[in-house]
Image (spheres, rainbow, N blue to C red):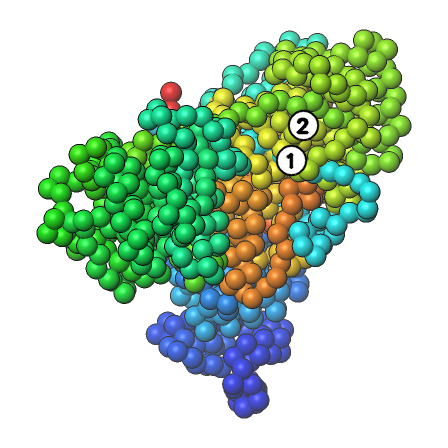
Amino acid sequence: MLITLCYLYLWARWGRRPAALVRITVQRLRASRCSFTFCVAAARPPEARVCLSRGGRVFCVGESQSIEDLNKWALYLVPPLVLEAEHIAFVTESVWVRAEGPRQSSRTEAIVKWSDCCLPLACRPGDPHQLIAKASVDDFSKLGAAFMEDRLQMANGLIPRKIVSVHIQDSTLQELKDQAATEPALSLQPGPESAVQGEPDPGAMAHAGKDDQKVLGAERPPGRGGGSGHEAAGESSQAECCTELCGLHLSSCHECLELENSTIESIRCASAEDIPDLPYDAGGGNGVADAGRPERGAGSTSLTGKAPNILLYVGPDAQEAPGRLRQVRSVLADCVDPDGYTLYHLPEESARRDPWPDNCVLLVVAGGEPVSEAVHRRVLAYLAQGGKVLGLASSFVPAGCQLTSRAALQGTVQSLVFSGTGGSPVRLSVLGSGRVYKQGPGEPTHLGQLHGCLDGADQDRLIVHVPVGARGGEAVLCQVHLELPPDSSVVQTEEDFNLLKSSNERRYEVLKEILRALGLRCDAQRVPALTPLHLLPAAEEIRGPLTQWLEKCVAAGGEIKSSKLSLRLVASHTPDMEVTPTALPVVTDPAAFSCAHFDLEIYRQNLQTKQLGKVILFAEVTSSTMNLLEGLMFETPQEMGLIAIAVRQTQGKGRGGNVWLSPLGCALSTLLVSVPLRSPLGQRIPFVQHLMSLAVVEAVRSAPGYQDINLRVKWPNDIYYGDLMKLGGVLVNSTLVGETFYILIGCGFNVTNSNPTICINDLIAEHNRKHGAALAPLRADYLIARTVTVLESLMDTFQDAGPSGVLPLYYKYWVHSGQRVRLGSAEGPEVWIVGLDDSGFLQVYQEGGQVVTVHPDGNSFDMLRNLIVPKQP
């Protein structure tokens, strides 16, 4: 009766505020050990009393629900569950709502993400998919209120159907701890086709750096120069699969190395002990195409004898023309050979009067306004003389073509099927202009090889390839906005942004194929010349050790050699000094350093470490930052905390020897760390790569105001935008010398380079548009310093508390909670991803309730198909 009166009182006082009702109810009644349930009305426990009913969902209170047997649950944390008195444990039941495939979400301002409000403890995959988690009273109430208002978002296509608080017996927890201490991990041996690689991500809780008014981290004291760069690396790779997952025995280095070889790219022996070299793994690697090319070429002559001028006509509208011109110029500059062509604006008056057709290899007509009669006649005459025309959402059409309005397509995202000169059709999401092409009475019978249509029953034509005249004139006309980047200026919803950004690389591929069909060169890329290195102290306390080390090196000849290159220490650089991939001068005078892309003061202000990143080996352009440190890793004192940073690299490394292209705008670096063999992290070296991946994510999301930027970690060691697009990765090399691992951690992630995929500043701009915020864009130098700071904090936490110290943050940011995948192929066995075991390997849940540890052997995770697939020979 008392509880009923309490409900009536709360309803009378808080009836119009569900969130407050839920919170007050939970706060007042949780001491009674009752059970709080949020569910659809049909699933309400019959004995429970309803506190709130809303939209077919109820919040009710009933008898305490207990969990006494967790043997069939897959545990997330090691050691097993630890429940604080101030937290509420609860079970979430969810169902799958769609088939496997790329996910798109339509989020609103009030969406609450399940993973942001609680810590997962255990799961039991199936239908329904069950998750045990714990949360504070406020966060549990927030989840419940979001569920009642249909604002609660799970991951991987799961829809929540029920949330119920539970009591877990102390005896049950103790029993699980005892089991974890005595039972070995299970091992899955499905054969080479379905062996799986597993790698974790840990967490960090460091706030490093200062916020800035324009670009966060850009404020610096007057009179100091600088800039920032960073080296892109791929993912950490793995060697051959062990036959059994076993614990590390410190008494035997052989057994230690056998464990570590499954997740470290290469471990080489440099000690006196007779430990054999371990095999090098060849995994998959990803790269980002070059996005930093200039918009003007060298002015060479084309094969037709015409000057290499691409003319851009964007219409007579004086207000819209400048913005449209920038968009068209930018996208074409990223597509054509920068050494072969020059991009010029063709103003309205010049288009009418000047003899531009004589010096034009391509005319680009962009803009929706009708083309004036005078310009239209000149363009037709240009085509008749063998000219080439590219129309981008323009009203211009040659004889025989007609345009028809489709209001439903204007400004909306559509699916386009593009067919080129060979290969399979390309499907991509595009922004429609609101018009389609219809066949006119004089249209040529045989069109060109290129065409694009809507992916639907009507197959309306959006791209046509029209030959004109007898002299080889041709026009490719598009009624989709291939010139527009997918940013907040062209889309209205996050779903549209995701669709266009996911197709951004294919947009460039389609545009390049069109340009090639019109006779232009798109493949040549200018490789930047290598530059000298600079050795820079990032903290005052390191100047002394650095100076002593330099004096020692100079006395020994001033040259440091490795198997790949030679570094020669010099006080300053002169133009006659040769810079080659194998012989590099290293300028040791900090006063001689200046770079427009890396600000040393910004890096110094935001680096808050005890050791890591204290000495910088910087290059504007180098072959690979990983190569730079291989020659220095055993030559420098450990307290120097060496890091190599570059603005560009010409031979960046991905997994298994793959090349990682490094455009201007990436944060590129390789960090040297040392880890004692006889330490928690030394026993679990596979965690290093995951710590680095998580450090990048946390460096952004721990900055004040940036906590909702949807940057996440994808297994095994990628940095992703949600679960949609990759924007960074990690590569690890390790060498064991005596009792110490010397580890090179290469990392690269996109910061300012929007094209051809996505970058962190894209996510910030989209967040600002969606939430009406004004977050400043970030800089590479700022983020490198924060990442190193967070990484050191993560490593310290791991050494103090082991995996359980970092896994909570890892699970908060990873993209695989409850994800269903298949092993080996589309017909392979289906499993659910559960989490990571104590050694950092992946755990999956099989049909029948068995949780197994899957051994990595260089496999990769294909997110687009939800497969864990073996590496290709």
What residue does disc 2 label? 619
Q: What element carries label 1?
A: loop
**Percent position of residue 810, x then y:** 58, 46
Judge the density around disc 1: few (<14), some (14-19), many (≥20) Cα neighbours within 10 Å.
many
Q: Nearer the viewer, residue 343 or 494?
A: 343
Q: Is residue 185 visible from the viewing direction of this image? A: no
Disc 1 and disc 2 in contact, CB within 8 angstroms? yes
- Which amino acid type is marked by label 2? Ala
Judge the density around disc 2: few (<14), some (14-19), many (≥20) Cα neighbours within 10 Å.
many
What residue does disc 1 label? 229
Q: Residue 524: which quarter of the image? A: top left
> Which residue sits at x=73%, y=38%?
226
Please give left or right for residue 569 compared with residue 760 in the image.
right
- Which amino acid type is marked by label 1? Gly
Badge 1 or badge 2: first in the primary sequence: 1
**Percent position of residue 572, x then y:** 79, 21
Q: Nearer the viewer, residue 614 or 842?
A: 614
**Percent position of residue 791, x then y:** 68, 40
How far, Cα to Cα, is label 1 from label 2? 8 Å
Residue 296 higher or lower than 106, as above or below: above
> Which residue sits at x=86%, y=11%?
555
